Amino acid sequence: MRKIWDIHGGIHPTENKKQSLSEPILQAAIPPYLYVPLSQHIGAAAKPIVQVGDKVLKGQAIASASAAVSVPVHAPSSGTVFAIENKTVPHPSGIDDLCIVIETDGLDQWRERKARQDFNFFADDELLSIIRNAGIAGMGGAGFPAAIKLKSNDSKPIDTLIMNGTECEPYITADHSLMLEKANDIATGLAILAKIIKPKTILFGIEDNKLDVVNGIETALNRIDFSTQSGCTTDVRVVTFPTKYPSGGEKQLIEILTGKQVPSRGLPADIGIVCHNIGTAVAIKDAVCLDQPLISRITTVTGEAVNRPRNYHVLIGTPVSFLLEQSQYQADKNNRLIMGGPMMGFALADISAPIIKTSNCILAPTEAELPTPPPAQACIRCGMCAEACPASLLPQQLYWFSQGKELEKLEQHNIADCIECGACSYVCPSNIPLVQYYRASKTDIKQREIDHHNAELAKRRFDTRQDRLIRLEQEKIAAKQARQAARKKTNPPNDKPPTANTSAANADTTATTDNAEREATVKAAIERATIKKATLSTTTDDPVARAQAKREAQLAQDQADPEAKLKRAVESAQQRLEKLQIKLAAAKESDDPNVNILEAGLEKAQSKLISSQQALDDYKKASHSED
Amino acid sequence: MALMRVTSPHTHNRQTTGQVMQLVLLATLPGVLALTFVFGWGTLVNILLAVVFAIALEASALKLRRQPVKFYLNDYTAIVTAVLLAIALPPYSSWWVILVGIFFSIIVAKQLYGGLGYNPFNPAMVGYVALLISFPVAMTAWPTPIHLTPNTVIIPNLFEALLIGLTVIERPMIDGFTMATPLDLVRQNDSLLLNDLMNEYPQFGRWSGYGWEWANLGFLVGGLFLLQRKIFTWHTPVSMLLAIAIMSALFYDGGSSNSAGSPLFHLLGGATMFGAWFIATDPVSSAVSNKGRIIYGAGIGVLTFIIRKWGNYPDAVAFAVLLMNFSAPLIDHYTQTKPYGHNNSK
Ligand code: SF4
Ligand code: SF4
């Protein structure tokens, strides 16, 4: 038995897993229309590469990765591209987002596939590009592109690979059923991961409420010689540990299995660990051995408002409503529809939202099952939340500061380390929606950082302007003094009052100096213009071609340095925001009726800035583990 | 049914503040029964009057503050405060003493500070100390345990006890109905060896005050029950009791005439157990982190002992708790826990 460690806090909610495990995984039907969102992962949205009306085959790429942190999207089934438009997507905020809508033809006809059973045939970077091109993004819920996590980084060698088979959220059994039915696929996927990562230790973590899978997993793992895969002696262990929520959180699982803690704001790679979900392992196996991209997943459909709770093998893009029908959904009994589990899942605003790569569960509970929360009472500071918090935070203090919007205090109390697991809200006897407060505060903090950054930029610009003005002023003074000196020279000191003659001469010299100055300026201007012209003519005279050339150069540069591109995006968003801010201020001063429009524009620009900042952060985070 | 838009988590352990408070009330039962057994119906009448006053005052305060009355009354905290204050008061207290005490607890210490959760001081103890300062005589008049009462004094039955509380009939103030408490005796003693003192006065029992030790054991049982139900953690009560034990061991002095009393005498005497398990554990006014709670509890223990030995009050727990309430924010500041990932690898 390998030693395991305990984590702080944690809770034991009713598991409710049996319901959906009574039947094996079922292949869900193909819906008439598939709604495939272009952004199903952390990072930039994919770019469509098909057009409305195009025929597509199952597995064909329909959108390509648009940035370093991005993954492509594939057609989940064969049919015709029906539309590319904004549709409801599963997102906590209930927003619409760009989707490719495919009208399926029911043939489910694959594109050409090259099956390749022996993955040893591939070099590591070939494997990596297969994984990237297969559109695999973390299947555990966060949706982090798998290939990025896999890139090797010499400064941070990985010695431990952790397979996350914890699935600690109540109700969800997608991973459980996968481990029951596809142990061999998981083992093969794990072997591919081991070949790329070359870890010394592989730990397969399973909560002890799933002991029925352990034998199967161990047998499957024993079939594979991991030491030859990774090129060194690899110790492979299946480790079971007591069931407790949220043991499956990446940071928590790492502590349970290794006793180490991921540094705050750091990555597992910082301590030589990388963690992958078993769903990801299966997807990798399918991509490498069967040449099948990620176009389907296992989703648990459960809750008392469905008569037949079970796990489905479902195509990405299938509307939730279509899937629910197959489980005999009773809409009148359902009080809220949750994508994900009861602890961290989010309520769907629209039943027609599609299943995406991260959708591990659709939970349709009745009111009796998950009752409407009663109104929150006062915090009695009982400390139960602190006892439950797996991050060892003081949720009651965070709540207090959140109410007062004391952002500094919140940061001091490490709100950034909150993983939003909901354990604190779960135990709070006063029914305070604590996590909701933390989410809002985190957004506030991010916004403040952006504002701060903007102010900093504005200040810098102001300072340079000020400097320039001072310099100009000084130059003017210097010129004046020079003129005066020149005047003195032509006006030799004598005691006689100036005669008309001398004054005329004086005027003359002034005129000449002035002329000389003017001449110099004109000359400089001409020079500037010639240079400009020269640069223009060296490129090309056709403005369209010029713009294109410029863009191409830009693109080339982008490819070389995606970070620069992201940075540029942030900068341009910032510039736009600033311009708008100035405009808005002016409009407000002059009571312009366009204030509303400008305000809306400003908001948009702000969100654009946040999202591009996010993309940059994601990339930095990712490349942080890369280089 | 329209779909709800709520954020995660969607599930809850379904324990409410009202339920927590009901458990606390339930846990006072063994101690209250012991007190009733020892001192008669007075404690129960105290509780009855205090609860009625507390509900009335809390409801009117909420009304004045334009808060939903029923919603807040349902959290049971006013009732808990009332019961705790009533237990701390000498049995057979007059209704106006109780009313003044409840006024200080509910109106001054709680509602004026903004209601539940915002009170920096333990409401029950604020009420108690206010009374102690305003009515020192009434507050020190503890009745004689029933079994030590001379036959000439008639023990009031429940109805008579109620009438005494309502001051319809007079409390028998004759000698023998009230008596110096064991804590007073030990403090005032300067001539007898501790053992002789305990043998001479009937107020002493096997380990501590006669009757007091049973009440203390009752509150200990109730406290352990709450601990087992995870209503609070062990840190505050255990550190407080340990501090009292250590301090009294230091000043035990081998049982001389200067002795402050044995550790057991202190642990099972006065309001020690009641204070440790029901007053110091009040979460609102205590420290938040576990480390902080150890310091907080230890502070209460040390102060309790110091005031018992050198102060001039019947018991010291109330003062000790209020003093530590003062220090709680400071303790919190210096005992912030290290969250996950901040260099505390095991
Ligand atoms: S659990 Fe709720 S009531 Fe208790 S301290 Fe935390 S936030 Fe306050
Ligand atoms: S949601 Fe955040 S504060 Fe609450 S228990 Fe989880 S990590 Fe702790």
Image (cartoon, helix red, strand yellow):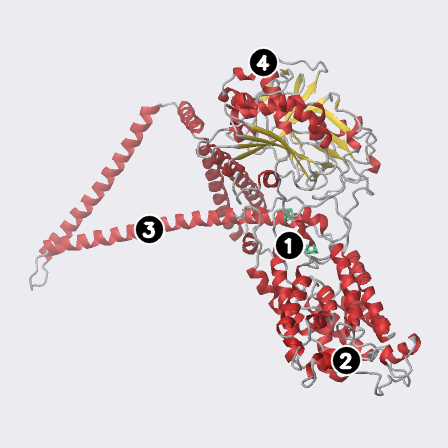
Label 3 and label 2 in one chain: no
Label 4 and label 3 in one chain: yes
**Amino acid type, residue under disc 4 in the picture:** Arg
Pointer 4 residue: A116
Q: Secondary structure at mark 3?
A: helix
On the question of residue B60 being in view, the answer is no
Measure the C-alpha gap from mark 3 to mark 1: 46 Å
**Which chain is home to disc 3?**
A
Pointer 1 residue: A399
- Discs 2, 1 touching: Cβ within 8 Å: no
Mark 3 or 1, which is nearer the eye? 1
**Amino acid type, residue under disc 2 in the picture:** Asn
**Amino acid type, residue under disc 3 in the picture:** Asp
User: In the rendered image, which quarter contains the C terminus of chain A?
Assistant: top left
**Which chain is home to disc 1?**
A
**Which chain is home to disc 4?**
A
Mark 1 or 4, which is nearer the eye? 4
- Discs 3, 2 touching: Cβ within 8 Å: no
Pointer 3 residue: A467
Q: Residue B199: which disc?
A: 2
User: In the rendered image, which quarter contains the N terminus of chain A?
Assistant: top right
Label 3 and label 1 in one chain: yes
Mark 4 or 2, which is nearer the eye? 2
Mark 4 or 3, which is nearer the eye? 4
**Quadrant in the picture for residue B42:** bottom right
Q: Secondary structure at mark 4?
A: loop
**Which chain is home to disc 2?**
B
Q: Earlier in the sequence, mark 3 or mark 1?
A: 1
Using the image as rendered, state which of residue A343 and residue A550 is in the foreground. Answer: A343
Q: Residue at x 73, y 83 (%)?
A: B136
Label 2 and label 1 in one chain: no
